Structure formats: structure tokens, C-alpha cells
Image: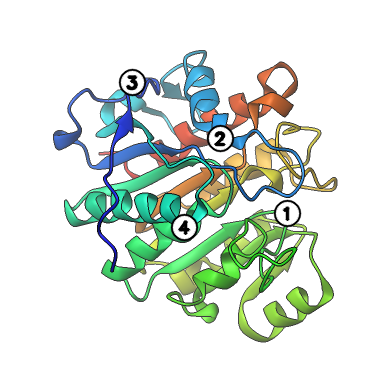
């Protein structure tokens, strides 16, 4: 393993009500500002800061959950410093940062960035939890072997994750775009549900309860009417409310890691998507890791 890549952060992280001392935190929020393989509209490298900024407009209290963020032990340690334009080295930095968090006994919560960053974080989490379940919320299958000749791409991320997470442990929700061979692969190997999120998630909960779960949420699972600020919009997605309800449905599950990716502030009219991203982060924190 190459361990030559130093891990450092651009600080401070400013998500609402984050703790100042990361050593006391159960959950570590951190940004992976990478969008080098985005295939349409770039800009998700600004996603972590956009989400943080939007969080300042929210209350810390969630009336849906009856909980306050100040009761969650989470720290925002800022954005990783990545070697700009270098995909492999950036993924290695993200992996090492996530591995450090996991080794300290803390839970990683990463803000992207493009979806390829998930490859690095799940790799680190799977080392500790080899039987981890991956819940993948997305408009796209992300099961290609390569995209325009590139093996490492935001369009190939889930396929590459099958190197260390069993395909049978991967549950895909909201999918409505991909090549025919990707859907055929999913039908044979993963657990893919087209278009919807809430009903299939409810149905599979008995299968995953008690197991270690990693959640990866690509904001484009939500219809672009609610989340236009992303790199590859795909009409026909779920509503913002359905996605919020899906996270709340996971309340009490054994969530060992999460990421929220593909928020792209340069493509985000009036900050709509960053605001949704910030609320999804808040509801996830309150649903999964409240005292």
C-alpha cells in the first residue's frame, strides 16, 4: 500500500452546530472537493463549501425527528487538500483520511465532490467491516467498467466498489439511467430498484437491520425540479420529501459511514440544491447518531 500521501485539511469546517474538538466527536464531517472525472457539468468540487454555507440558514432542531443537532457529537474538520487533477493520488488521500477516522473509532461522513470519491471512503470502511452493506441512492447505475476509456470515473464507481463489497450486499435505489449491460449486471448481481426509493427501502429493512451499513447519496437521485444543481441532471427522480423520509426511515440502523455527493453550486439556481444537501446532512446526523 502506498502511504506517501500526506493528509491535510483546509479549515475551518463550518457546518451548523459542529463541535470544535474532533477528538470528542463520534462522527467526523469532512469534504472531498474533487470533480476531475465529471462527464457533463463540472463544479461539484465546490459542493462541500456550498452545503456548509447553506446549513447556516437552518435551525438545528428537526421537528420531524424531535431532535437537536447540539445533542449530536459531530465535528466538521474541513476539506481535504487534494493534488488537483490527479485522480489516483486524490483517491489515495481520501482513502487514507477515511482510514484514519475509522481507525480512531469514529464514523466518516464525507461531502463530495463527484461520486468517484465514494470508492476511496468505502474501501477504507470495508477494511473494518468486510460484510458492510452499501445503500446506493442515485439516478445512475454507475456500474460501467470504463467510461470514455477511463476505468476510474464517477460513472464506474459502484462497479469498482464490488472489488471489496459483495455485489449481493449492494442495494441501489432511484436508478433511472444507465447502459443496458449495467442493468443486466445489476439484475444478476446487485439489488437494484428503478425510479423509487421509499417503498423498496422499507421492504428491505428486515434484511439489513443490525448489519453495518454505508450510505452513499448522489443528489441526482432527487428530481432536478428539486435539485437542479448537479452535474448530470436526470428528470423523473424522487421528491425532496421522499429522500428526507428515506433517511429518517433508517433511524436506529447501524450506519458506519455516509457520503453526500454531486452537489454542484455553479449549476445551482438560487442555492436550491445546496440547501437540500444541508438538510439531508442534518436529518442524517439526527436520524443515525443522536445520543
Q: Distance between the residues labelled 1 and 2?
A: 19 Å
The quarter in which the N terminus is drawn is bottom left
Q: What element carries label 3?
A: loop
The quarter in which the C terminus is drawn is top left
Q: What element carries label 1?
A: loop
Q: Which of marks 1 and 4 is in front?
A: 4
**Looking at the rendered structure, which numbered label has been put on residue 139?**
1
Lower sequence index among marks 2 and 3:
3
Q: Circle 1: is it few (<14), some (14-19), or many (20+) Cα within 10 Å?
A: many
Q: Nearer the viewer, mark 2 or mark 4?
A: 4
Q: Distance between the residues labelled 2 and 4?
A: 16 Å
Q: Quadrant of residue 44?
A: top right
Q: Which of marks 1 and 2 is in front?
A: 2
Q: Residue at x 38, y 20 (%)?
A: 14
Q: Is mark 4 on a helix, strand or loop?
A: helix
Which residue position holds label 2?
45
Q: In which quarter of the image is residue 242?
A: top right
Q: Distance between the residues labelled 3 and 4?
A: 33 Å
Q: Is mark 2 on a helix, strand or loop?
A: helix
Rendering coords of residue 8 (x, y %):
28, 37
Lower sequence index among marks 3 and 4:
3
Asked whether 25 or 210 is in front, the reply is 25
Q: Are marks 1 and 2 in contact (CB under 8 Å)?
A: no
Q: Distance between the residues labelled 3 and 1?
A: 31 Å
Which residue position holds label 4?
88
Amino acid at each position: 500500500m502506498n502511504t506517501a500521501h500526506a493528509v491535510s485539511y483546509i479549515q475551518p469546517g463550518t457546518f451548523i452546530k459542529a463541535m470544535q474538538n474532533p477528538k470528542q466527536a463520534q462522527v467526523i464531517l469532512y469534504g472531498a472537493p474533487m470533480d476531475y472525472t465529471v462527464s457533463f457539468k463540472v463544479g461539484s468540487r465546490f459542493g462541500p463549501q456550498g452545503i456548509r454555507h447553506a446549513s447556516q440558514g437552518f435551525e438545528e432542531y428537526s421537528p420531524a425527528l424531535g431532535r437537536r443537532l447540539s445533542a449530536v457529537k459531530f465535528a466538521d474538520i474541513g476539506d481535504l487538500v487534494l493534488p488537483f487533477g490527479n485522480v489516483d493520488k486524490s483517491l489515495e488521500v481520501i482513502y487514507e483520511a477515511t482510514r484514519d477516522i475509522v481507525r480512531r473509532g469514529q464514523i466518516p461522513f464525507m461531502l463530495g465532490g463527484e461520486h468517484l470519491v465514494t470508492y476511496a471512503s468505502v474501501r477504507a470502511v470495508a477494511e473494518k467491516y468486510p460484510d458492510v452493506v452499501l445503500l446506493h441512492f442515485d439516478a445512475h447505475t454507475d456500474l460501467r467498467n470504463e467510461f470514455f476509456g477511463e476505468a476510474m470515473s464517477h460513472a464506474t464507481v459502484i462497479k469498482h466498489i464490488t472489488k471489496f463489497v459483495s455485489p449481493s450486499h449492494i442495494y441501489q435505489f432511484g436508478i433511472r439511467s444507465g447502459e443496458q449491460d449495467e442493468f443486466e449486471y445489476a439484475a444478476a448481481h446487485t439489488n437494484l430498484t428503478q425510479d423509487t426509493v421509499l417503498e423498496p427501502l422499507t421492504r428491505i429493512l428486515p434484511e439489513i437491520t443490525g448489519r453495518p451499513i454505508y450510505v452513499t447519496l448522489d443528489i441526482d437521485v432527487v428530481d432536478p425540479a428539486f435539485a437542479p444543481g448537479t452535474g448530470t441532471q436526470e428528470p423523473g427522480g424522487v421528491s425532496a420529501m421522499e429522500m428526507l423520509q428515506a433517511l429518517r426511515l433508517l433511524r436506529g440502523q447501524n450506519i458506519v459511514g455516509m457520503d453526500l455527493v454531486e452537489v454542484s453550486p455553479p449549476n445551482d439556481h438560487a442555492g436550491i440544491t445546496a440547501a437540500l444537501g444541508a438538510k439531508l446532512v442534518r436529518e442524517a446526523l439526527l436520524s443515525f447518531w443522536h445520543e
